[in-house]
Amino acid sequence: MKQRMSPRTVVATVIAIVGLGVILPPVVVPFAQSVWWDIERLVELPRVQAARRPPRALPLRTGDTARFSRDSFAFVLATERGTWIDTRAGTMTVDRIMDPDTTIALRFSEAELDTLYREAIAIRLFDELTLDPEHKDSGVISFSQRYRLTVRAGTREREFGWHAIALVDGRWADGSWAAGRAADDWKRLREFVGHAAGIAHRHAEYRALPPARGVYID
């Protein structure tokens, strides 16, 4: 036999349901989000570890130094914001943000060029290294810039262009998230560019420049 709820009981039930609807979401939703993020991190962990693993060293090939002569080794590294390193011209143009770009004389030493040439040979920059696929991983961006690298040795000249995106959690949203050889090539190129820029930044001519005014907000 069905029993009817009294009006007072109905009102109390409605109030209780509404109360739970007000109280529970602030408690349950953050907890559910936290659990979901933890699960997502566990699922992504192998891929994160692979992306942060150093690239596999390639065996050196006999004949590469003959095919790609050290005597003519040179490169131009440019960014969309105006920084430009030209080892053949012996100059560097520096992005000054709010002020006009500044070009200074900055010539790499033979020892510095030797180091970069050996690295270029080791990563097979002149023939095998590729940036395919240009995979993009999602996340909150902390840095974003387009690069262009033109490198020459012997009669061989290659040009690379790519969009570097760094995420706030330290990941790179590029092809280093791909699998196998493609991921390693992205890491190799990023290391080469980092070493070249680092050499330029250690030169006294660069360090003598006053700090740039302003900042970029990506």
Image (spheres, rainbow, N blue to C red):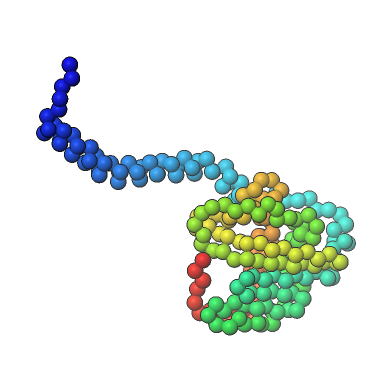
Left or right of residue 104: residue 124: right
Q: Which residue is drawn at 49% across and 44% down?
A: 41
Question: Where residue 145 appears, x then y in whole percent?
Answer: 59, 66
Q: Residue furthest top?
A: 1
Q: Which residue is drawn at 24% across and 39% down?
A: 20
Report which quarter residue 198 is drawn in: bottom right
Toward the viewer: 6 or 70?
6
Q: Which residue is drawn at 77% across and 71% down?
A: 74
Left or right of residue 34: residue 218: right
Asked whether residue 113 appears in the rendered view, the answer is: no
Residue 88 against residue 139 in the figure, above or below: below
Residue 191 against residue 177 in the figure, above or below: below
Toward the viewer: 130 or 17?
17
Report which quarter residue 117 is drawn in: bottom right
Left or right of residue 218: residue 2: left
Question: Where residue 143 appears, x then y in whole percent?
Answer: 54, 63
Question: Where residue 6 appears, x then y in whole percent?
Answer: 12, 29
Q: Which residue is drawn at 62% across and 82% down?
A: 102
Asked whether residue 80 appears in the rendered view, the answer is: yes
Toward the viewer: 128 or 121?
128
Question: Where residue 153 appears, x then y in whole percent?
Answer: 82, 66
- Which quadrant is the N terminus positioned in? top left
Residue 132 against residue 108 in the figure, above or below: above
